Image (spheres, rainbow, N blue to C red):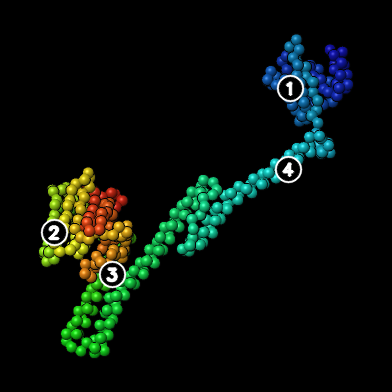
Amino acid sequence: MNDLQALMEDASQTYDTRLLLFSADRQVLLDSGAGKSAAIQLPRFTRLRSNSVLKDASGVAWLYALKRLDNGNWLMVATERPNPPLVMLLRDEFFWPFVTAGLVAFILSLLLAYWLARWVGDPLQTVVTASRQMPSAKAKPLALRGPREVRDLTHAFNEMTTRVQASQKSQRDFVANVSHELKTPLTAVQGFAQAVLDGAADTPEARQQAARVIYDEAGRMHRMVLALLDLARLDAGTADFQRAPVDIPALLNSVVEKFTPQARGTGLTLRIETPALPPITGDGDRLAQVFTNLVDNALKFTPARGQVTLRAALIGSEVQVDVADSGAGIPAEALTHIFDRFYQADPSRSGGGKHGAGLGLAIVKEIVQAHGGTISVRSAPDEGSTFTVRLPLTPPADKPVAKRKK
């Protein structure tokens, strides 16, 4: 054993290593570094790791290799793991290639980060700039660029811009139309009032005529203001709707009875064709307003010896009502605007001056939509017009009529 210890010490000095011999039960039998270095214990799991790094009792790291001998003992060859100084690292042949590769990777990462920032940031900055120019009517749709989320945001912004511009145009048109519609009656009122004040209306008949014109024009302005208020409430969703069963045939019959004297007086035939129908849920007064307006318009724009017909039928889960006339019809270019506010078709259809401010059909459309229904028109020159209203038996839950408690 002493000879083996001497041999191990000699080999240790020759190869600058440390040799250790362990028994099968992991006990140190011989150690060439005994007395010189801290003790080393045989690591666990020698079958899995025959070479690796371990630390001795003083914490010094050793690189080792294990070999199991035929007699079951273990021979370990260990060398203290070196801690190379910085100078040695700098002189290492792999140091500068690693440094160069790191710098290249760093520069490439900076360029990639810059590109990504521009790719995402530029479209967002464009949206920010465009949002500050939002009031401008000249704003154009933005190009869809960048990642999908940014493109979605830009698309939503373009849609919002379109709605804002349409709203601004609608407001401008509204102010212009109201001003135009008020100008005529106000001019008449002012003119005849001035005539009375100046003494130009110096006879009882002249003063009575002036008073009649003032009264009629004031009534016209009053009706227009009421219609505007009604539209404003319908737009804001604050209009008062009742919710109750409505008998459509009975409602249409009452409208026909109301206009029969007027139709006879102008030489027109007013007819109704309706079977028994199930009641719908809605506001009876508002629906009467709808059909009163449609029948009134039909009578105004139908010449003598013409005919106005109301038809009702059940189509699936909806009640359909047609108001058809044999009048001159509506020009094709006017059909797309017939429900716009203040819009009036060909002035020749004014029925001899019996026209309003162009708000009636706009109100009709709002009321029908509040019931979850639709309104449409079919017309051709010299073939008359047919307005079709379709109303669900029960309005959808998101409509004003449905939200109203019974």
Amino acid bearing label 2: Leu
Looking at the rendered structure, the secondary structure element under dot 4 is helix
Amino acid bearing label 3: Val
Of labels 2 and 3, the one closer to you: 2
Q: Are there few (<14), some (14-19), or many (20+) residues within 10 Å of tag 4?
A: few
Looking at the rendered structure, the secondary structure element under dot 1 is strand
The one nearer the camera, 104 or 358, is: 358
Which residue is label 1 attached to?
Answer: 51
Q: Which of marks 4 and 1 is nearer the N terminus?
A: 1
Q: Distance between the residues labelled 3 and 1?
A: 98 Å
Q: Which of marks 2 and 4 is nearer the N terminus?
A: 4
Q: Name which quarter of the figure residue 183 lies in.
A: bottom left
Of labels 2 and 1, the one closer to you: 2
Q: Which of marks 2 and 3 is nearer the N terminus?
A: 3
Q: Which of marks 3 and 1 is nearer the N terminus?
A: 1
Mark carried by residue 381: none
Amino acid bearing label 1: Asn
Of labels 3 and 1, the one closer to you: 3
Q: Name which quarter of the figure residue 181 lies in.
A: bottom left
The one nearer the camera, 308 or 13, is: 308
Which residue is label 4 attached to?
Answer: 103
Which residue is label 3 attached to?
Answer: 225
The one nearer the camera, 262 or 379, is: 379
